[in-house]
Image: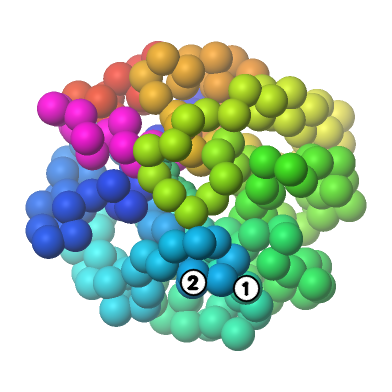
Amino acid sequence: MGHLVSPSLLSADFSNLAKDVQLVNRSSADWIHCDIMDGIFVPNISIGFPVVSAVKKIARKPLDVHLMIVDPDRYLSRWKETGADILTVQYEACTHLHRTVTEIRNLGMKAGVAINPHTPVSLLKNSLAYIDMVLIMTVNPGFGGQSFIMESYNKIAELRKMIDSGKYKVLIEVDGGVDTKNARRLVETGVNVLVAGNTVFNSKDPVGTIRKLKRL
Ligand code: DX5
Ligand code: ZN
């Protein structure tokens, strides 16, 4: 399987979101990445249920919803109702991760776990059997347009080994500072899903940029 591309709406035009969702619809992107921030887990607040359900109405690709919120268990079924297809929680925000990811799957969504730059991939060793995706944060979560943290390559390679040696069916997604220059090395290191916000929506030709990220 080739890699997937999931453009992040965080860098889209929120005064004309339909236009940017339609742009992603007609592009070669695979998923649509929606960043949910609560102002507590991260020092920023983004969008919530009403905006994501509006996106769902017109989206023709699966919604890849990334929760950067504390206590995500309170809202798992709400995200299902809102239209999330893949629901990713932050490892650092979960006290009972197994319970959380099991609930996400029971609700009929794919379960992802995101880890911050300081969180070692080894902490996921005993969770790989129960999840569908690991999101390696390649910047500190909270904002679009930050620069990629180079240590992330070591984390990706280590996680790739863990997944392959255990024959787990787990995708590796990266998020933050992804661009048309580092995308190829990321995929070669073992990434399955590239998230890109700033690179896509602040380029002159977003559809062309998505195509570049897709055909490396
Ligand atoms: C950051 C978000 C990202 C963000 C990535 O906290 O989780 O999804 O949109 O943005 P870029 O691609 O601009 O670094
Ligand atoms: Zn994200």
Q: Residue at x 43, y 49 (%)?
A: 143
Which residues make up the magenta segment?
195-207
Between disc 1 and disc 2, whose residue precedes? Answer: 2
Q: Judge left or right: residue 152 versus residue 204.
A: right
Q: Residue at x 89, y 52 (%)?
A: 126
Residue situated furthest front in the rendering: 43
- Could one spot residue 132 in this view of the protein? no
Q: Residue at x 47, y 75 (%)?
A: 79
Q: CA distance from mark 1 to mark 2?
A: 8 Å
- Amino acid type indicated by mark 2: Asp
- Amino acid type indicated by mark 1: Val
Q: Is residue 60 above or below residue 121?
A: below
Where in the figure is residue 62, as x and y percent of width and height?
38, 55
What residue does disc 2 label? 38
Is there a contact, CB below 8 Å, between mark 1 and mark 2? yes
What residue does disc 1 label? 70
Report which quarter residue 34 is drawn in: bottom left
